[in-house]
Every structure is written in structure tokens, then in C-alpha cells.
Image: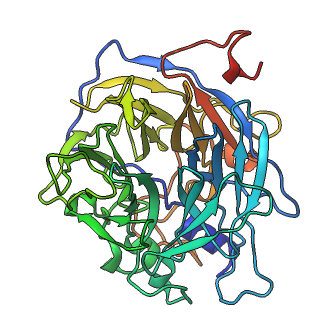
């Protein structure tokens, strides 16, 4: 595969484009608009500049971890010679200072991450596995364990794979109330895998205590809309702070769903000895209005957890909307829009997004919400009506376009990648605010 071909093929694993809405949610007049600012700019790592930050998590030590999802220089045969460790996990403190830059595993493509105690779990979407690191990370950290979940994304192309099992496109990963890790598998449509056989979306679960894994939930509403461009289904799944509901986003249809969950023993809270039971039935629609939330991606609640109990705004759900270049705050009880944060406001002279550009992941750390800007030029507008020569995208699909508010020149001038930050309660920095870098 050529570099442009591979970039086009995989760039949109965590992004969705315009669909025709069937229902429209109501938005009140009192919806807040919250500004965002740049928290950190990813470093240049010679000889290449890995970018497109996607996976992100915060740990118990007050550090923020973000990985690059750059597949333009990955190797596609095993064993590789020489092995290619091109992607990185970058670690920042709350002042935006770079603490560590950890090379990811050779030939890997990291996406969702979750920190649990002194462990960091990272999805490798190409090979359908989860790599575990010990915290704190250093510049020479390597995984101390690997969990094989499924065959990975490369199964669809007949390329050498490390694990057995079916095709999967593991995107997001979140800790569940029972101590297990839950992963959204967004599948893929024919425009990217040349087959209608991989359109099913799943929620997988991994028990890190014993290494067992399997499909936790499947439903047709999580599947890929094959008429979308690019066609990927359920992108993320997150539990509410009370552990009673699972929220799922399908970025090919722009729907956000909610589904009740229960443990084996209803008289006790979920725990590693009282696991959640795989739910049945269809989820309920929480929100659907592409004019506000187009291509819903990753999600986070803005409550805080102390001593295994949640408090604060535990019913406020924040969702990134890459196609709209904003983040949307919903009331998870009724789907009401409470606030939006950010927009695209151009590039700096150095070629870095000033506000938001294709926001992907969102994480709460302290009093702030952090958003990484995937800013993937592979999502630039591409005319597919005639099937461009050499294109992997079949003719007849809608044009593959990035956000309509993003000028084409942006992609030419884009040279750096950023993490943004905002305060959900509209706090303002002052000379005594530790999170403002003073």
C-alpha cells in the first residue's frame, strides 16, 4: 500500500461525516457557549512528526496521557525489518509540561486508553489487542502484558495478524463499574474494507484480572450506516457515574443511545466479584440532532470520583463532535443540550489549531476538561463521484469531506497538533489557580 492510500484508508477510524437527520432534538435558549484554549502542543519527534492525537486518559497521579494515531508510516508485514515504532504516548502534567514521550509498540496503531491505578491499558486497533504499561511512563517504557481480544482491523485485508479471531475495529475503552474494561468496536463499511461483512458494531469487555474477553453487547443500532462516509458505527461507550446506564455513540448515524445495565447480584453494587450481566433488548435514543452533534465520538462525565463514590455534576455527559468542531454537554437524564464548547478558529503562524479541529477524545482531570484535536488531513474533502484514479473509495459515494467550516487551506498549513482545555463550570484562571500554569 502506498502512503496516501493507507492514510485515506485508516484515517477515519474515530470520525464521522454528515448524514440526513430523521429527528431533531430541542435546544433551549439558555445553552451556554464555553471557550477553549490550547493546553499543549505535541512535540516534533525527528525524523518524522507523528500527529493526529486520538486516545487519551488521565491517571490517579494527576497526569494526562495522549497517543498519536498516525498510520502513514506503519509497517504492514510481520516481522518488520527494521521494526517501526512511529506512534507515541505523550504524558503531560496539569501545567502542560511534557513528562514523558513513550514510543508505542512497533507497527502498532494506538487508539483508546484507560488508566487504572498504576496500570495503563492501550488499544492497538490494527491487531485487536490491548497493551498494558506500568505507570508512571518513561521514555523507554514497554508493555508488561498484552491481551488478545480479536483479530483486529487488518483481518479485512488478509494481512498478517498477531491474534486469531474475527475482524474488529476497537476504538474506545472505558473502565466499567465492575472493574472490567469495555471497548467500542465500530466496525467498517464497504468504502474502507470492500465488503459488507464487517458492518456490525459491538461492545467488547476485557477482564484484566484473568485476561478473559468477549462481546458484551450487540444491537443493530450500533452497526455501520453503509451510506455514510466514512462508514463506522459505535465509536465509544461510557457508563454513568452510578454504574446503572451505558451510553453509546454511533458516529455514522449521529445517534447517542442509553441502555440500563445490572450486576449478577442486584442487591450489591457492581464489583469484580459481582460482574455486569450482558444486557438484552434495544437501547433508548438519548440524543439525535446532527446540526448540533454531528459524528458523536468520545464521551466523558464531568463528575469526580473519591473513595469509590461519585459526586458533583454526575449526570452531565460531554461528547466530542468532530464534524462540528465542538464539544456538546448533554443532560444524561433527558438529552437536553446544556452547553457547547469550542469551535474552529484557525491556525497559528506555526500551523497549530488555535481552538478545536476534529476533536476526538475528552477527559476530565481536576476542574478542567481536556480534548485532543485529531486534525487528520486524511479527512480532507475528496471527490468520490467519479472514483478518482487509484482511489480506494468506490465511485458513487458522497464526497469524503472534513468539516464544512474548515477551509481547504487549513490542511495545507497544518503542521502541529494540539490538546485543548476548557472549564465546564466556566471558571476563570487567576494567579492562584494551579491548573492555569501559574
Q: Residue 124: x and y, percent?
A: 55, 69
Q: Residue 167: x and y, percent?
A: 40, 79
| Quadrant placement of the N terminus | bottom right
Q: Residue 135: x and y, percent?
A: 66, 54
Residue 308 location, quadrant: top left
Question: Residue at image x 51%, y 40%?
Answer: 362
Q: Which of 20/218 is in front?
A: 218
Residue farthest right in this picture: 47
Q: Which of 392/216 is in front?
A: 216
Is 135 placed above or below 308 here?
A: below
| Quadrant placement of the C terminus | top right
Can residue 73 be seen in this snapshot? Answer: yes
Residue 373 location, quadrant: top right
Question: Residue at image x 43%, y 66%?
Answer: 209
Residue farthest top in this picture: 431
Question: Residue at image x 66%, y 13%?
Answer: 429
Can residue 404 be seen in this snapshot? Answer: no
Amino acid at each position: 500500500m502506498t502512503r496516501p492510500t493507507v492514510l485515506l484508508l485508516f484515517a477515519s477510524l474515530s470520525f464521522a461525516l454528515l448524514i440526513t437527520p430523521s429527528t431533531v432534538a430541542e435546544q433551549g435558549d439558555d445553552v451556554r457557549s464555553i471557550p477553549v484554549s490550547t493546553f499543549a502542543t505535541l512535540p516534533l519527534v525527528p525524523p518524522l512528526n507523528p500527529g493526529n492525537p486520538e486516545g487519551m486518559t488521565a491517571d490517579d497521579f494527576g497526569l494526562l496521557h495522549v497517543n498519536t494515531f498516525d498510520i502513514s508510516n506503519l509497517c504492514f508485514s510481520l516481522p518488520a525489518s527494521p521494526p517501526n515504532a512511529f506512534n507515541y504516548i505523550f504524558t503531560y502534567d496539569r501545567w502542560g509540561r511534557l513528562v514523558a514521550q513513550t514510543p508505542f509498540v512497533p507497527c502498532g496503531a494506538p487508539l483508546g486508553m484507560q488508566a487504572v491505578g498504576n496500570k495503563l491499558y492501550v488499544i492497538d486497533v490494527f491487531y485487536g489487542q490491548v497493551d498494558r504499561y506500568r505507570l508512571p511512563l518513561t521514555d523507554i517504557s514497554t508493555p508488561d502484558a498484552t491481551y488478545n481480544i480479536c483479530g483486529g482491523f487488518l483481518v479485512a485485508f488478509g494481512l498478517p495478524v498477531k491474534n486469531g479471531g474475527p475482524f474488529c475495529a476497537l476504538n474506545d475503552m472505558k473502565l466499567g463499574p465492575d472493574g472490567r474494561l469495555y471497548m467500542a468496536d465500530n466496525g467498517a463499511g464497504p468504502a474502507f474494507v470492500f465488503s459488507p461483512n464487517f458492518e456490525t458494531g459491538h461492545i467488547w469487555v476485557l477482564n484484566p484480572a484473568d485476561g478473559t474477553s468477549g462481546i458484551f453487547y450487540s444491537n443493530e443500532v450500533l452497526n455501520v450506516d453503509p451510506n455514510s462516509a466514512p462508514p463506522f458505527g459505535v465509536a465509544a461507550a461510557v457508563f454513568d457515574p452510578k454504574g446503572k446506564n451505558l451510553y453509546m455513540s454511533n458516529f455514522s448515524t449521529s445517534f447517542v443511545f442509553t441502555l440500563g445495565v445490572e450486576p449478577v447480584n442486584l442487591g450489591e453494587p457492581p464489583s469484580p466479584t459481582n460482574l455486569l450481566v450482558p444486557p438484552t433488548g434495544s437501547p433508548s435514543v438519548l440524543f439525535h440532532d446532527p446540526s448540533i452533534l454531528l459524528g458523536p465520538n468520545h464521551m466523558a462525565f464531568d463528575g469526580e470520583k473519591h473513595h469509590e463514590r461519585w459526586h458533583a455534576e454526575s449526570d452531565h455527559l460531554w461528547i466530542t463532535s468532530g464534524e462540528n468542531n465542538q464539544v456538546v454537554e448533554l443532560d444524561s437524564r433527558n438529552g437536553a443540550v446544556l452547553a457547547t464548547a469550542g469551535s474552529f478558529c484557525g491556525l497559528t503562524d506555526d500551523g497549530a489549531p488555535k481552538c478545536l479541529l476534529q476533536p476526538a477524545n475528552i477527559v476530565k482531570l481536576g476542574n478542567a476538561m481536556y480534548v485532543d484535536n485529531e486534525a487528520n488531513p486524511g479527512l480532507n474533502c475528496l471527490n468520490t463521484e467519479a472514483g478518482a484514479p487509484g482511489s480506494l473509495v468506490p465511485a458513487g459515494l458522497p464526497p469524503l469531506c472534513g468539516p464544512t467550516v474548515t477551509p481547504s487551506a487549513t490542511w495545507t498549513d497544518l503542521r502541529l497538533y494540539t490538546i485543548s482545555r476548557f472549564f465546564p463550570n466556566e471558571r476563570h484562571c487567576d494567579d492562584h489557580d494551579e491548573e492555569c500554569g501559574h
